[in-house]
Amino acid sequence: MRKRNSPPAWSRAPCGHRSAAAHALRATCFARRLTVRQIERLASRHARGRKEKSEIHVDPNVREALDELQRHLGTKIFLRQRTKLRPGQLVLEYYEDAQVDGALRSTNEVVLEMARDEG
């Protein structure tokens, strides 16, 4: 009996594609040991590709507030719009733990200052 070195047929790239993306898809299917239905769903998503995101219109006042917050915290900030499946998100980008600590300290200072102004 001949020994097979290749993965089973269910893990091969769908439709015989041989691109790098198809090989990555094949590896994912093999590593996760997906069912046929899961592979079909994954291949369908892969075939559709990602839709280009349309330019999101952000209110100028919100944009200015985000820019000011970005300058104050010293880190890049993204605003992810709410979708049907997930809530809106305010994302702080950082590369070192010190940036997170600084951003949290600055945020606490702003909150305390706002509380003093209200009280």
Image (cartoon, rainbow, N blue to C red):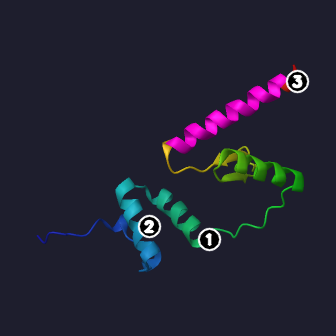
Q: Left or right: 40 with respect to 78?
A: left
Indicate the quadrant containing the N terminus: top left, top right, bottom left or bottom right: bottom left
- Which stretch is magenta? 98-116
SS of the residue at dot 3?
A: helix
Q: Left or right: 107 with respect to 93?
A: right
The residue beneath circle 3 is: 118
The secondary structure making up most of the magenta span is: helix
The residue beneath circle 2 is: 25
Q: Is residue 9 above or below residue 62?
A: below
- Distance, label 2 to label 1, CA atoms, is 14 Å
The residue beneath circle 1 is: 48
Residue 36 x, y percent position in the rendering: 45, 60
Please give the name of the residue rendered at 46% of the width and 77% of the height, measured from the top-left corner. Answer: 15
Q: Residues within 10 Å of mark 2 (few under 14, many from 20)?
A: many
Asked if residue 45 lies in the magenta stretch, the reply is no
In terms of sequence position, does the residue under pointer 3 or pointer 1 come before the other? Answer: 1
Q: Amino acid at mark 2?
A: Leu
Residue 5 found in image quarter: bottom left
Residue 30 or residue 75, whichever sits in front = 75
Residue 102 x, y percent position in the rendering: 59, 39
- Distance, label 3 to label 2, CA atoms, is 55 Å
In terms of sequence position, does the residue under pointer 2 or pointer 1 come before the other? Answer: 2
Residue 47 x, y percent position in the rendering: 57, 72
